[in-house]
């Protein structure tokens, strides 16, 4: 019987990957986010099991482990996608300011809402508000293939910045005493140290990749990046900066500051590494994303979404997030209004940060149904915007990732 159960799990995992691939094709054809379909599949299976009185339990660490690995892969993939050039300085600046403004004001507004409705300590409310204010690159990036290039690049930069900034600010605040001048100095010092360390480690890893001639290279690097991320977290460093900068350095090797290293690592050699990393991170991100959002769907109790308080609070949060995003894009940025306004889903980072809230900062009256409501509702809003923008053409998923040669 145990042998049969093992094969059933294997078959189920394979079917999930197949369905996820089909969901990707459906997403490209219709504009419905594949992540939303995975969430609904998880919710549907949960209800089927409950209806048949089948016992099941999803441990929190399963969601958290997949979330951490997925986070590393997504940030690395985002770094590999971010091409820096003089022509893009304005775009990058706009995306960074958009991420900062929307994250800051959304956090303040959502924390005020929680503070006045739950009547609990404001700091705890702020800690809960930050995850709700982070736009999920894990959902946005796979859903923008049909957009114009400038809109696509803006959303890639903005959501990547939102992820990084949200995680850094969240970790800084839960460290305690964040308003003390000494802690602020330590924080910025740790960021500067992480940047210097990231550049050094990135160059060493890249040198190693260009020197290794065996076919087994990627998962060695992946293991090293996870090790660096976990080590950085234990040392209270902004570990994601290390992952992001590695991706940025590798994907922008054509820039003048790196020309001095060409005698050790030529542009052609690094370009080959970029091809390898692009393909494998895309495949790995797809796999991790598949299991994470499906498992997360299994943890969602749909009955919580029918609670009146959850509907009122969740709707209020979504309205706040939508209005703040509209105000900035419409009156400050004066560009990237549609469909960028609708691309505001909450997802992997939001869930991961919620699981990271220390016991001492947890709100006693917060209903987790609000988290589920916001994630599902913002994903549906993105779906509406994507479909309204235009019906994308079906694009075949290629095994090869084209790399633009910007060396000249």
Image: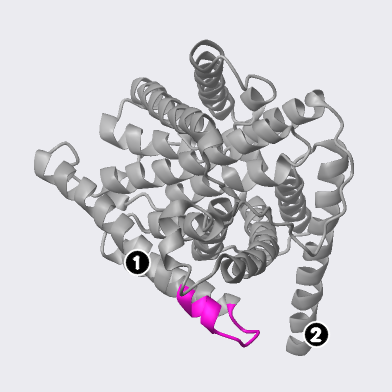
SS label for mark 2: helix
Q: Is residue 32 left or right of residue 238?
A: right
Query: How far apart are the two marked residues, 1 and 2, measured between alpha carbons?
Result: 50 Å
Q: Residue at x 50, y 41 (%)?
A: 368
Screen quadrant of the N terminus = bottom right
Residue at (41%, 33%) from the top-left corner?
129
Q: Nearer the viewer, residue 387 or 131?
A: 387
Left or right of 44? Residue 180 is left
Q: Is residue 69 above or below residue 396?
A: below
Residue 339 in percent (x, y) is at: 69, 24
Give the residue number, with chain letter if any, for mark 2.
4
Q: Quadrant of residue 52?
A: bottom right
Instruction: In the rendered structure, find residue 167 and report the number of the disc placed on it.
Output: none
Give me the disc on residue 200. Answer: 1
Question: Which residues fall within the magenta stretch?
Answer: 207-217
Task: Tell which residue pokes out farthest to the top in this image.
Answer: 331
When asked about the image quadrant of residue 303, the answer is top right
């Amino acid at each position: 019987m145990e042998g049969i159960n093992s094969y059933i799990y294997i078959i189920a995992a394979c079917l999930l990957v197949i369905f996820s691939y089909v969901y990707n094709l459906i997403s490209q054809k219709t504009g419905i986010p594949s992540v939303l379909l995975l969430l609904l599949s998880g919710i549907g299976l949960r209800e089927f099991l409950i209806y048949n009185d089948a016992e099941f339990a999803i441990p929190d660490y399963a969601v958290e482990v997949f979330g951490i690995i997925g986070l590393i892969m997504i940030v690395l993939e985002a770094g590999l996608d971010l091409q820096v050039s003089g022509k893009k300085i304005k775009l990058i600046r706009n995306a960074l300011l958009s991420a900062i403004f929307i994250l800051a004001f959304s956090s303040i507004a959502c924390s005020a809402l929680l503070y006045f409705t739950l009547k609990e300590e404001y700091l705890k409310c702020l800690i809960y508000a930050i995850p709700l204010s982070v736009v999920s690159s894990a959902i946005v990036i796979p859903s923008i293939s049909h957009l114009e290039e400038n809109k696509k690049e803006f959303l890639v930069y903005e959501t990547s910045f939102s992820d990084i900034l949200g995680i850094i600010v969240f970790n800084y605040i839960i460290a305690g005493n964040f308003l003390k001048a000494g802690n602020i100095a330590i924080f910025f010092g740790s960021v500067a140290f992480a940047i210097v360390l990231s550049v050094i480690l990135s160059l060493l890893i890249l040198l190693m990749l260009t020197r290794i001639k065996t076919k087994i290279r990627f998962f060695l690097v992946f293991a090293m990046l996870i090790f660096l991320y976990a080590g950085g977290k234990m040392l209270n460093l902004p570990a994601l900066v290390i992952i992001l900068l590695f991706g940025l350095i590798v994907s922008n090797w054509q820039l003048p500051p790196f020309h001095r290293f060409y005698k050790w690592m030529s542009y052609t050699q690094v370009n080959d590494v970029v091809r390898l990393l692009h393909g494998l991170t895309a495949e790995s991100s797809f796999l991790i994303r598949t299991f994470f959002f499906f498992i997360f769907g299994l943890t969602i109790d749909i009955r919580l979404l029918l609670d009146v308080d959850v509907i009122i609070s969740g709707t209020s949060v979504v309205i706040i997030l939508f209005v703040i995003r509209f105000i900035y894009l419409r009156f400050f940025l004066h560009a990237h209004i549609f469909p960028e306004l609708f691309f505001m889903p909450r997802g992997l980072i939001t869930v991961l940060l919620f699981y990271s809230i220390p016991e001492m900062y947890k709100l006693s009256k917060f209903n987790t149904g609000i988290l589920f409501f916001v994630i599902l509702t913002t994903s549906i809003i993105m779906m509406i915007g994507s479909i309204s923008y235009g019906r994308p053409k079906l694009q075949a998923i290629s095994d090869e990732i084209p790399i633009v040669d910007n060396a000249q």
